[in-house]
Image (cartoon, grey):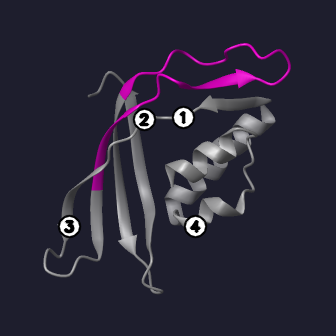
Amino acid sequence: MWQDFTAAGHTSDWRSPTLAAHATGTALTNLTRGLYADHYNRLVTQGEPVLNPTVSSAEPSDVPMEITVTDCGDSTHWLKYRVDNGQLADTPGGRRLINAIVQKQADGSWKVTDFGVHAVGTC
């Protein structure tokens, strides 16, 4: 999901069809709204986050249908810039706690259904 979002962020393409490949529900809504806001405000995101996700829980444990993924993502080199002049439009990034709910879909695929990204310094 984050790779799809990162790629779409380079042009603030809130209509990117790749976003739905790994996200649905609230997660997909939040991704597209964020990209639309950047598009509207003439911002693009450059760079990439550094991620090291781990599964922190699985329910039910014997045949999981939902997992929680936790990460301490680093956005130091993943920042927003103004399209008109190329100037930094974001506060410096850093390490932040990320939690995501990933659910098995009817077709057998797994998609992020919700996530929370916390403030810099939360991990």
Task: Farthest residue to the right: give it.
Answer: 84
Image quarter for residue 103? bottom left
| Residue 50, disc | 2
Instruction: Report helix, strand or loop for mark 4.
Output: helix
Q: Which residue is mark 3?
A: 58
| Residue 21, disc | 4
Give the x, y percent position of residue 111. 45, 67
Q: Residues within 10 Å of mark 3 (few under 14, many from 20)?
A: some
| Mark 2 or 4, nearer chain start | 4
CA gap between label 2 and label 1 equals 7 Å
Give yes or no for contact between labels 1 and 3 (Cβ–Cβ under 8 Å).
no
Instruction: Choose between 49 and 96: the one closer to the eye.
Output: 49
Instruction: Report helix, strand or loop for mark 2.
Output: loop
Task: Farthest residue to the left: give it.
Answer: 62
CA gap between label 3 and label 4 equals 21 Å
Query: Dividing the image into 4 quarters, which one contains the C terminus?
Result: top left
CA gap between label 3 and label 2 equals 24 Å
Instruction: Report helix, strand or loop for mark 3.
Output: strand
Instruction: Residue 42: say if magenta.
Output: no
CA gap between label 1 and label 3 equals 28 Å
On screen, residue 114 versus residue 65, left or right, reads right
Q: Is residue 28 above or below residue 62?
A: above
CA gap between label 2 and label 4 equals 20 Å
Which callout, 1 or 4, points to the residue nearer the camera?
1
Give the x, y percent position of residue 16. 72, 57
Give yes or no for contact between labels 2 and 1 (Cβ–Cβ under 8 Å).
yes
Q: Is residue 52 above or below residue 19?
A: above
> Which residue: 51% across, 59% down?
26
> Which residue: 13% across, 80% down?
62
